[in-house]
Image (spheres, grey):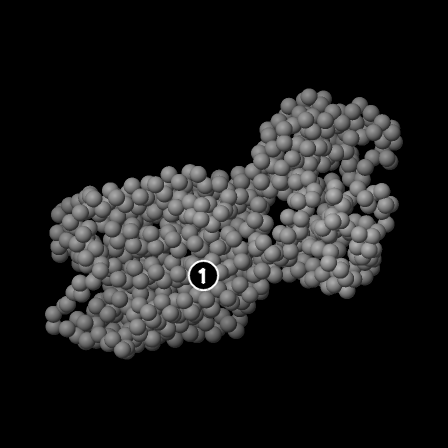
Amino acid sequence: MLKPFRKIVKFASSSKGAKFVILAWVLAVVLLSVIAPSAKDYKVNSGEGSVNENTPSEISNQIMKEQFPSTDGLPALLVFNREGGITDQDKEKINELSEWLSSDKKPDNILSALPFHALPPPVQKQMYSEDGSTLLINFLLDPNLESGEVLKIMDQIRDKVKDIGMDGMKFEITGPAGISADTISLFKSSDIILMVATVVLIFITLIVIYRSPLLAITPLIIAGIVYGIVDRILGLAGKYDWFTIDSSAVSIMLILLFAVLTDYSLFVFSRYREELKKHESKYASMQEAMHHVSEPIVFSGGTILLAMLTLFVTVFKPYNSFAPVFSVAVVVILVAGLTLIPSIFALMGRKAFWPFVPKVEKESKTKKGIWFKISNQVMRKPALLGSILLIVLLIGVFNFSSIQYSFNLLKSFPEDMPSRQGFELLEENYPAGQLAPVTVLLKSDKEFEINEEFFHQVNDLTQKLAGQSGVASVTPMISDEAMKDTRMLPRNYLSESNQTVRLQVILNSNPYEKEALDTVQKLRDSEEQLLKDSGFSTSEVNLHFAGQSAQQLDVKHMNDRDMIVLFSLVTVLLTVILGFQTRSILMPIIMMSTILLSYFSTLGFGWWIFKHLMGYDTISYRLPVYTFVFMVALGIDYNIMLVSRIREEATKLPWKEAVGKGVAVTGGVISSAGLILAATFAVLMTQPLQELFLFGFIMAMGILLDTFLIRGIFLPSILILTHGKSKKQLHQAEAEEQIS
């Protein structure tokens, strides 16, 4: 199975092959830079919908577009606030802004705006908050606008407000359009900041650990070359619409690329240094090093790729859009690990390690560092150490079950972000549910018979909806006059096709919180009974629920479904891959079990820290999926490296000693790689989004836990206690190694 890969690495490690490989990579970067655009030109926010666009809320939105086309648009909310009450002078300035938004001078792509300036004073008064301190005016944008265009319009409105002058009155823009604009504004230069921070951090860490400038700069040069190719491939994908280039996926991919390539570089040059002490030829040393290192790199890259490919089975767009971006990156990273990394280090030879140049030694010397001492303790007390760590990890696992999740994306944004401040002003001064009402569509397969009986049925349905727990009010109720003269019906109540009636439900709770989602779920579950009790035929008429609460409920369902599918699929597939690598049944199960234990324990302890030390009541619902895919895929890397070395040593030593030797000789390089990987993910903690901050924290914490406790102590203890392989299996593995 590994023969083709070993032929490739043998060629890449040879004198002619190394030069050819480096030239091929450089030419590829130059060529793609000329013919392909950068991925940054095509980055988009994939949204929170379904890849199939078939969730109940998406179906409801489609019905709304078809039946009420005039209401279709991206809503923006203008929020005006003054403590003590909005004054008459403030009102004049608001009227001026309202006139401008309704005039021909307004920015392009504003479809319509509420004409506050033209409304009668009594109607205007009703629009203020109860204490008169806050006013909300809404307008609609073209729904097909890119986020960058939305940001441009928001900036034009803010410039107009500055020209008018609000004299101390607070002004914020919120709603879907405001949030979209602020998101783009936040991440305008995030990739550049991330890249610079990542490069600097990796360079400093490598200098501190290895004290060699060339060893510190070379992995970064390699990562730069690989990033140049990945970026242009993604740019081509965006240009020709092969798949979505999600902005969040590109940002996290950048971290993954630099971190994994640095890890692979450490794996290669640490073994290369060993071989340079045995062989004069730098190329022969690299060929021997890659003969041993190529297996863990292939299986490591394979497990990461497989984990990313499983994201294709998800139905939630943000998860699904990660799949192509990361799959492309991992394939290029794997090819670089087998060709570019050995070629560059082989060409550099002993100079790469300056000033600590390795020389050929007649007798191999083993340094008895900290990992030699740890390995001795593991061999002496595997049961004690394994039991202690198991108890500690299970405490974290137990805490995992108490995690509370939030579906309110605004909570993830900085507190000073305009759209968040605007929304919080509305929360303080208006009923919670009024911020994002639920739209109820009474839809018939054929035209309703429009008469008084029909309107009485709808009014009856309206009353029954209003009587449901969690519902504050339902509008409109149709008057007797409107029943007799349909021209008096409220705007957008009945569609032109006479097939759909539109009602508005105000919930008691915040439309983004769990209570609101539960209320919408109860309304959906009660659909058939509500229709029957109101006199409608359930075979011809349906209720559809649209709005933010309905959308977030569908997000919750998609997230639950994707978690179950992903966790199951990744666990099974990666266990199978580990089975191929170890040629065992028990060992891959043990390896995967320790990784899962590490994952659930990390999230459990992380939640305790977030709640009790950082003061968070909830965390983003996306964190478990993101951390699972990356933590499991990357955590297995170090287990693969360790077990590969243990299997190699087990052909020469008894199993217990082989485990100890494997821990001792790989401890330094794996702990260095783990520190760099953890630090690299910790760079995400500098980002303004709470979700990325928590993701970076959890990843860094999990990688450190996995590197030093799971890989260094817990897994070796379990491997010793389960006796590893039998002598027959060891001889068989040795024979297979010699044949390959």
Name the residue rendered at 63%, 42% in the picture: 548
Q: Position of residue 370 (x, y in %)?
A: 22, 60
Query: Which one is nearer the viewer's eye here, 334 or 646?
Result: 646
Left-right relation of 6 to 104:
left
Image quadrant for the N terminus?
A: bottom left
The answer to whether 588 is drawn above or below residue 146 in the figure is above
SS state under label 1 = helix
Q: Amino acid at mark 1?
A: Val
Q: Position of residue 339 (x, y in %)?
A: 34, 67
Say if residue 169 shows up in the picture.
yes
Query: Which one is nearer the viewer's eye here, 210 or 310?
Result: 210
Figure quadrant of residue 146: bottom right
Image quadrant for the C terminus?
A: bottom left
Name the residue rendered at 74%, 43% in the picture: 131
Query: Which one is nearer the viewer's eye here, 428 or 21?
Result: 428
Name the residue rendered at 69%, 55% in the picture: 172
Say if residue 540 shows up in the picture.
no
Q: Position of residue 689 (x, y in %)?
A: 53, 55
Q: State the count of labels.
A: 1
Q: Residues within 10 Å of mark 1 (few under 14, many from 20)?
A: many
